[in-house]
Image (cartoon, rainbow, N blue to C red):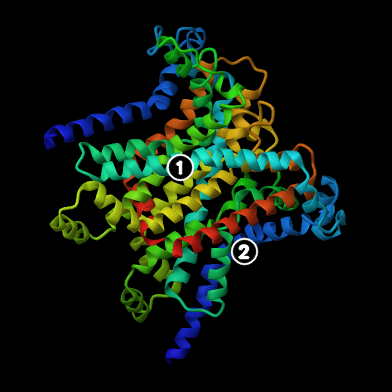
Amino acid sequence: MASVKLKKIDKAAYVFMFPAIIIVLLFIIYPSVWAFVVSFKEGSIIAFGRKGVIAAGHWVGLKNYLELCTDTLFLKSLLNTLYFSLIFIPLTMFASLWLAIVLNKNIIIKSFLKSIFFMPYVVSIVSTCLIFLLLFSSETGFINGVLSYLNIKGPKWLSDSTYAMPVVAFMSSWRRVGYFMLLYIAALQSIPEDLYEAAAIDGTNSFQNFRFITWPMLKKINFIIFILLLVNCFNIFQEIYVMTGGGPGDSTVTVSYLIYNEAFTYFRIGKAAAMSYVLFFIIIIISVVQSKFVKE
Amino acid sequence: MPKKLKTFLLNAFVIFITILFLIPIYWLIISSFKTGSEVTAVPVTLFPQKFTLDNFYYVWKFLKFDLTFLNTILVCVPVTFLIVVFSTMAGYALAKKDFPGKNLVMTLLIATMVIPATVLLLPLFFIINSFGMYDSLLGLVIPFSVTVFGIFFMKQYISDIPDDLIKAASIDGANEFQIFTKIVMPLSKPGIMTLAIIEFVNNWNSFTMPLVLINSPDKYTLPLKLTQLVQSQESLNWAQIMAANLLTVIPVIIIFLILQKYIIKGVMAGAVKG
């Protein structure tokens, strides 16, 4: 009797899973396999459009991958992405942790402040880009306007190859800091209160509390946030497309932007697919290394 | 330093940081009420000298912004609805049922979470094209009607529903469909709300996929339209662009302000459990 009932329930499970599985297979798994296969091929965009992934183009083995090793623009895009992440990741982690610690204390209107800092996260990247284009406009922008009140002549920001990427990184940080702040607040609240009570008996100061209790307890969330931010870095595309177009002088060409250009501007399908898989492997390697490091 | 003074200084510093933090939002709002000449005038004005609504009128009347709004809603509403329904169904099956192949499904879903969006961009263009959904709003709905985040989010939520309730219902003779619609869905209402808000906002803000999948300006969604305004040769001034931008941002800000409780709870719940 019981087993009959169980079987009936099993069938229903498949019905419930069906739409999700179909969509995931067709529009996530299949595309990933598609890109992997195409990264070993060469062919025109029309051929891939008409014949499907197996018949179109011809096999070139590892050629696409090997070419990337000597592709100066690709290497530059990796360096640019690194430059971006060196500003973006520490800035976002520091700012969001600081906000979390402060807003976790007894501070006035703290739930209101939480909402304020989270708000930019619901504003689209495109909208944010437009605001920052205006703020950092070199002649008439708000930033240089304020600087000129102080008799400082501001740089040309987005038209200057030194400052363009930092501006993009700063903007990305501004938009995301509230999200990571919430993740940190959740982590802080899950630290058992008696740890601090015990420390208070030992007469520790607030710096020691942070150094020996809070920071070690945040190890796991730090790792998660680091990986999330890293994935963010490798997906930086819209910011570049809207704000700089990769310029000035290729100084803001990120990996994602280059992949988009290879695919949809130059129609080098195989090469774009190979690039996207290199990016994929880099993310996997970094997260494996980081997780080993954290476990020790 | 006395404790009261310390607290006061900390509060003052936090308020100061908050004000700096809000500058971009402030600039967005006041720029859209400035005249075209004032918005790029030197020196910059911190408040509009001549307050005008012309920018909004112009954007709405001459740039087909009404059509763009309609397109965006025509994408966001169905896609959010489908994500919620499909994710709740799948989340229910994964949380409350045992079936052969469940481990395989779980592994597959977890594996997809490490795939960067950039990898999918190029193949999705070809695949969606081969389904005949290129340059159609349907192509922004069907392929994105399930998110792995949504499935796991609902699975978490539904796991908290007591098994006894479901058992009791099935003993009372409720069939699977009734259990799902009369018990699972009502009990996971806050979770459904949170997921719906998050996915609606995500799709409202979505840019990269529409950029790749939509060609005709008549089918543009809001972010696509905004970039076109900046990059096109139509000589728009920054006040008009900011007005268009503000119109795009206002709906999500309103949704956020009214329903922020759900969003913030959703983000924090995901953090603790995940």
Q: Is residue B104 left or right of residue B85?
A: right
The residue that disc 2 covers is A22
**In the depicted view, which residue is nearer to us: A88 or B91?**
A88
Q: Can the viewer see residue B265 in this picture?
A: yes
- Reply above or below: B167 against A21: below
Classify residue A213 by image quadrant: bottom left
The structure residue drawn at horizontal position 61% and vertical position 46%, both measured from the top left corner, is B140
- Mark 1 packing: few (<14 Cα in 10 Å), some, or many (20+)? some
Give coordinates of residue A81: x percent, y percent: 60, 41
Question: What is the quadrant of the N terminus of chain B in the image?
Answer: top left
Which chain does tag 1 point to? Answer: A
Question: What is the quadrant of the C terminus of chain B in the image?
Answer: bottom left
Which chain does tag 2 point to? Answer: A
- Reply above or below: A192 against B266: below
Judge depth for marks 2 and 1 and give the one in front.
Answer: 1
Give coordinates of residue A240: x percent, y percent: 61, 33
Q: Gap between marks 2 and 1, in whole Å? A: 39 Å
Q: Are marks 2 and 1 on the same chain?
A: yes
The residue that disc 1 covers is A90
The structure residue drawn at horizontal position 64% and vertical position 40%, both measured from the top left corner, is A79
The structure residue drawn at horizontal position 35% and vertical position 47%, both measured from the top left corner, is A182
Q: Is residue A289 left or right of residue B191?
A: right
Identity, as a three-letter code, of the amino acid under mark 2: Ile
